[in-house]
Image (spheres, rainbow, N blue to C red):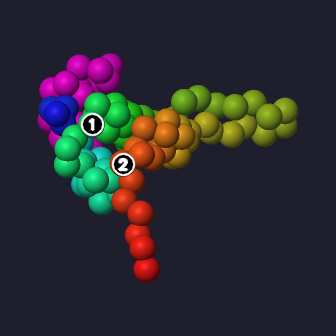
Amino acid sequence: MRPTVAEVAARILGADETALLPLYEAAWAQQCHYCCVDPYHPDLAEALHRRVANLWASKAHTLGVLDTGNDFGVQYVPRYDPMVEALEGPHRRIPVA
């Protein structure tokens, strides 16, 4: 069964349901586009949690400043999550031409 916004918000520190709702809907739409979601598998639920958490963390929140010797650079959350790929892999839609 697909997790609710409240269940996803409970796993993300500092997030409330109203702030996560647009991110949840975007992650759900993306997962529906890439995967066969009927029947909904527990792997897809975990991937949805990870998608929403990644979107929440990547909303222009910097992780800190990286000292590279002479210059300083800002670190960001990576946009690609290999665990999402691994969890959704067996459920991916494969286009056939």
Which numbered circle lies on residue 41?
A: 1
Q: Which amino acid does label 1 sit on?
A: His
Crowd around label 2: few <14 · some 14–19 · many ≥20 (10 Å) = many
The residue carrying pointer 1 sits among few (fewer than 14), some (14 to 19) or many (20 or more) residues within 10 Å by Cα, namely: some
Q: Where is residue 51 in the image (x, y as percent from the top left)?
A: 37, 40
Q: For the view shown, which residue lies furthest in the bottom direction?
A: 97
Which tag, 2 or 1, sits closer to the chain's start?
1
Calculate the distance from the C-alpha at mark 2 to the C-alpha at mark 1. Answer: 9 Å
Q: Quadrant of residue 70?
A: top right
**SS for callout 1:** loop
Q: Find the magenta span and give its range.
A: 5-23
Q: Examine the residues drawn in magenta and state their main secondary structure.
A: helix
Q: Is mark 2 on a helix, strand or loop?
A: helix
Question: Does 21 appear in magenta?
Answer: yes
Residue 64 visible in the snapshot: yes
Q: Where is residue 36 in the image (x, y as percent from the top left)?
A: 28, 53
> CB atoms at circles 2 and 1 under 8 Å apart?
yes
- Above or below residue 48? Residue 16 is above
Say which residue appears at 36% left-offset and 48% top-offset. 91
Which residue is labeled 2 in the image? 91
| Nearest the eye: 26 or 59 | 26
The quadrant in which the N terminus is found is: top left
Q: Nearer the viewer, residue 96 or 9?
A: 96
Residue 59, can we see it? no
Q: Is residue 67 magenta?
A: no
Point 49% across, 40% down: residue: 86
Residue at 39%, 53% (x, y): give it.
Answer: 92
